[in-house]
Structures are given as structure tokens and as C-alpha cells.
Amino acid sequence: MTNPGNRKKSTTRAKQEATDSVAPSIHHVHDYGYKILFSNVTIFRQLLETFVDQPWVKELDFSQAETVNHSFISKDYKKTESDIIYKLKLKNGKDAYIYVLLEFQSSVDRFISVRILNYLTSLYVSLMRSGQVKDKLPPVFPILLYNGDPKWTAPDNIADLIEHHHVLGDYGIGFKYLKIIENEYTHAHLLQIQNIVSTLFLTENHYRLEQLEKELIALFKKEDREAVSLFFNWFRVLAKDGRIAPSQYKAFEKIYTNITEVKHMFATAVNEKDKRLIKAGEARGEAKGEIKGEIKAIKKMAKQMKQKGYPISDIQEITGLPMEEIEKL
């Protein structure tokens, strides 16, 4: 990962700071939105496979992933952070847990490793009390996801927080969490990834409306519909709470609506049978007119996208129109 240095505050972040004194609940709404996003298995899987460069990620069976409906966050931190716990299976059939702490405080907590360790031991105690542990404790992978503006400076190893830790030898506490620091990813790096999580990080740290429009187009082409809908709803929450301008939200809404409608029209009007009918000139009367009308609407949408500067390859993949026909629009 590369630190972007003295990056400018994102529009969303600036708006948040401007409203801190009058609407502290915005923090909670935004943080809860993050928790909803990462409670979706598709988005959670993207987080791990894209931003967690560890061999154990390849050992996880995401088809059996489920969230654990329990939080170990203390009351002192309820307003500033959330946690998510996933239970999955390893390839050997054994259980594994992933603990993700979503950190949203405006300042860096130097002793956060102590808190994360406390949450993990609380999880283990809960598993033992419920009778889910027979011989050995299951592995729990601790992850910190941080989206604040200040540079992350807290030690990720608890040993670095204990004075004269070396004198304890083998009896010293050994614990380290894996950190995902959003503001350490450059704009260029995130653009290369092109998934929901990278677009989320772009929105938080490198807010550029025109670029985000193109990223959303790419997401709608290839991502799971439910995951994209959740992501789009996150934008709706940002607009509702004043963290992005209503006009900018409407731009995202228009993209979402148009592409959804175009995909639906194309799937309905131009399936393989319809293509053969049109090509052979066998369609007659009202049915043929309806198909032509829907195709006309698709071409209109393609023309608008072309005028906005979207790549022809993107337009072709979304609308299904032939490349040469798009070039003529």
C-alpha cells in the first residue's frame, strides 16, 4: 500500500466535519451504513480477497459464510464504531471466524490493539459457554477497517505498547491485528480494482463525481444486484444526512435507474428468439412494433452514454447493441 501523503479532504468528509456540531447522529447513521454493507457476503468477500493479502483467505469457503449476531463493543464506543463477526468454513471443514472492527473515530486510538484483543477473548469465552468448543478454540482473524482522515499511527502489535515487554520472554502477550487503512490507498490504485469496496474507498477519500459515475457504470455491469443495491442505498443515506449534495445523489440515481431499466428492456425484448425473429423478418404486427420500440429506447440510452464519453466497450456490454451500431450513433 502507498500512502498518498497530504491528500485533500474528500467532499463527504468535509461535509461531515461541518455538521458535527449540529448533527452528531450522522456519525452513527454513516457507521451503521458501513455495517450493513459489509454484512453482505459479496461485499465482505471483496474486502478480504482484494485488501487482505494473506494465504488463509484462499482457505475460506464463502458459500457458507454467515454473520454472528452478537457484538462485543462496549457501551463507551457504541457511538463511534461497529464490529462484524463472520463464521465460515475452512477447506478442511473446520470453523473459522473473522472479526472486523469498523473504526470511525476522528482521532487515532493508540491502544486499539488492547480493545481488539479484549473483543476476541470475549468471543472465545462466549463460544466456550455455549458449548461450541470441544477440544481447541477456532481461529479468529482480527481485522481493523479505518476510514478516518488522520494518518494511522497506532501500533498493530500489542507488544509495542508494553514497557519492557522483552523481559517477559515467552510469557509476554503476543497479539497483532491486520489493518486496512482506507486513506493509505491512492486514487490510481483503487481505480485499478473496480469493485464495490474500492469504489467505497474512492468515495470516502478521493471524491470526484465524474469518476464515480464511471465507476458505478462498471459496477452495474458485473456485480451482484443485491450488493449493488446496498451500495446505492449507502449513497442515499449520505444524501439524506447532508454528506453529499442532493444534486450529486440524483446523478447516481439516474445512472442506477437508467441502467437497470435498459438491462430489463434488453433482457425482455432482445432474447435469442427475438433476435432471430428480427433478423429473419418474421415478426409481425404489434409484437414486432413493441420490440422495435424497446430497442429504440435502448439505442437512445446508448447515444446518451456515448455523448457523456463512456467507452464504447462499456456501452456495448450494458446495452447489448453491436459495436458498429454504437459507433454510428
Image (tube, grey):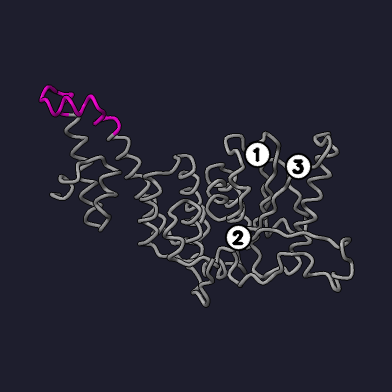
- Dots 2, 3 in contact, CB < 8 A: no
238 w.r.t. 184: above or below: above
SS of the residue under disc 1? strand
* Amino acid marked by disc 1: Leu
101 w.r.t. 185: above or below: above
SS of the residue under disc 3? loop
**Where residue 92 sits in the image (x, y, percent)?**
67, 35
Residue 299, picture quadrant: top left
Magenta span covers which residues? 267-289
Mark 2 against mark 3, which lies toward the viewer?
3
- Residue position for label 3: 138
Q: Earlier in the sequence, mark 3 or mark 1?
A: 1
- Residue position for label 2: 180
- Residue position for label 1: 90
Residue occupying the point 57% across, 50% down: 48
Q: Which part of the image, by quadrant, shows the N terminus? A: bottom right
- Cα separation between marks 2 and 1: 22 Å
- Cα separation between marks 3 and 1: 11 Å
Q: Earlier in the sequence, mark 2 or mark 1?
A: 1
* Amino acid marked by disc 3: Pro
In-image side of 207 versus 122 (left or right)? left
**Where residue 318 sits in the image (x, y, percent)?**
30, 43
